[in-house]
């Protein structure tokens, strides 16, 4: 599923899949949840965590009647109401807050018909094409996207690169997967020319049991492969395993690390915490942020807890911003794999609120930081 797995099978074990799936769907009542020691009150009303939604059928599209972006109709195969439950007024209010030039730094494209999934895929995903992606993002005013290789495609980047080519270099970047033991520098250069700017190691989705020796060997191998291209080494790693990264990251020189989804702390660690600093691994993450070569994606908060205003998730976000707002990037995490039918609007709204509550201009996190991380200034 990722890089060195085939060459080092004895050093990694996998948790049962149901543990990963159930972790993303934990929901606890407010009255049973510990109070945050720091006040993070936001004046905006709390939106409901989930709305009932139904999958809409794919309407006919007349390409000659619709504007296009590199051949992708802006009118799309799946309407925005399938994601926002028809709340067009609220959607407009959200879109009005999103700065021009915003990058969605974490979204996936999945097309099982045109690009079959890996035989080792840990879950089955519905089709979510580039056409669907523009249908979701364009009403929010977002035109620029970083397509991240999903674990279900393994090291076959065909679907991701097809989406990247459709976007074009002005509007697209990609984070791919490959095996450094078998991938040539020439191949990496070709991907770079298309707009690839990073490689993703997905330890979380496959339930990897990590140790220092394996992690060091793996990260050094990838860092050596991408250093000359100035790519990002993107890690989907449990927050509790972040302490293992500290001695390794310092050895990687100027290679930049990006942690997905706040580090995805476990539901049990959130339930017993009052603030971010009570969550195992967060203090180590702050030290990595202070060192300067580590970034964090402010994204996928629903994967941590279904309450869009969970106090500890808010603490994670705001403490990270308070420490190094210049090392945070924003993402929608579309199409919200394993959370079909999710209304993501309240989660995005909360993240925008938290960014602004820390006195950070939205343009910094949503535009400028992303441009810097993915070498996307034009």
Image: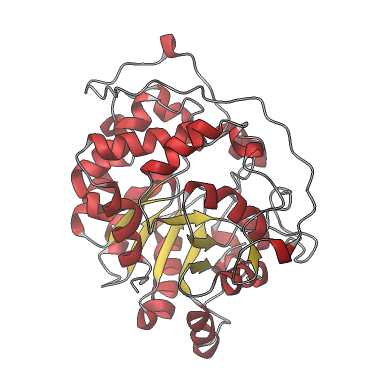
User: Which residue does the image show at 25% across and 43% down from the upper left?
Assistant: 321
State whether residue 255 is above or below residue 41: below
Quarter of the image with the C terminus is bottom left
**Can you name the residue that lies furthest to the top here?**
31
Q: Nearer the viewer, residue 24 or 346?
A: 346
Which picture quadrant has residue 70?
A: bottom right
| Colour scheme of the picture | secondary structure
State whether residue 347 is above or below residue 164: above
User: Which residue does the image show at 38% across and 22% down from the upper left?
Assistant: 272
> Horizontal placement of 239 versus 7: left or right?
left
Q: Nearer the viewer, residue 49 or 76?
A: 76
Image coords of residue 264 (percent x, y): 44, 41
User: Which residue does the image show at 57% across and 33% down from the upper left?
Assistant: 343
Q: Nearer the viewer, residue 220 or 321?
A: 321
**Can you name the residue that lies furthest to the front here?**
65
Image coords of residue 104 (percent x, y): 45, 55
Image coords of residue 119 (percent x, y): 76, 60
> Horizontal placement of 252 versus 238: left or right?
left
**Can you name the residue that lies furthest to the bottom here?**
186
């Amino acid at each position: 599923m990722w890089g060195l797995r085939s060459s080092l099978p004895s050093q990694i074990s996998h948790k049962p899949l149901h543990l990963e799936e159930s972790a993303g769907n934990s929901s606890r009542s407010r009255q049973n949840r510990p109070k945050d020691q720091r006040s993070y009150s936001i004046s905006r009303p709390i939106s409901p965590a989930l709305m009932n939604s139904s999958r809409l059928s794919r309407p006919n599209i007349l390409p000659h009647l619709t504007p296009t972006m590199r051949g992708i109709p802006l009118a799309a195969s799946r309407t925005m109401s399938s994601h926002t439950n028809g709340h067009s007024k609220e959607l407009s209010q959200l879109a009005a807050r999103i700065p021009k030039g915003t990058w969605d730094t974490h979204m996936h494209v999945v097309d099982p018909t045109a690009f079959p999934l890996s035989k080792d895929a840990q879950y089955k995903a519905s089709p979510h094409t580039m056409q669907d992606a523009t249908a979701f993002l364009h009403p929010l005013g977002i035109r620029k996207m970083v397509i991240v290789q999903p674990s279900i495609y393994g090291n076959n980047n065909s679907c991701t690169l097809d989406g990247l080519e459709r976007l074009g270099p002005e509007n697209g970047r990609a984070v791919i997967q490959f095996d450094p033991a078998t991938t040539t520098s020439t191949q990496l250069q070709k991907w770079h020319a298309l707009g690839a700017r990073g490689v993703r190691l997905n330890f979380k989705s496959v339930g990897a049991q990590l140790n220092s020796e394996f992690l060091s060997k793996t990260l050094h191998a990838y860092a050596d492969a991408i250093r000359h291209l100035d790519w990002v080494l993107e890690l989907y790693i449990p927050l509790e395993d972040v302490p293992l990264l500290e001695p390794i990251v310092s050895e990687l020189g100027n290679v930049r690390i990006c942690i997905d989804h706040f580090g995805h702390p476990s539901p049990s660690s959130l339930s017993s915490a009052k603030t971010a600093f009570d969550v195992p691994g967060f203090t180590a993450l702050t030290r990595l942020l202070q060192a300067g070569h580590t970034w964090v994606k402010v994204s996928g908060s629903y994967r941590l807890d279904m309450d869009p205003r969970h106090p500890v998730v808010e603490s994670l976000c705001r403490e990270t911003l308070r420490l190094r707002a210049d090392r945070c990037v924003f993402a929608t995490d579309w199409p919200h794999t394993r959370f079909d039918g999710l209304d993501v609007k309240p989660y995005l709204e909360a993240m925008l609120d938290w960014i602004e509550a820390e006195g950070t201009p939205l343009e910094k996190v949503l535009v400028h930081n992303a441009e810097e991380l993915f070498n996307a200034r034009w």
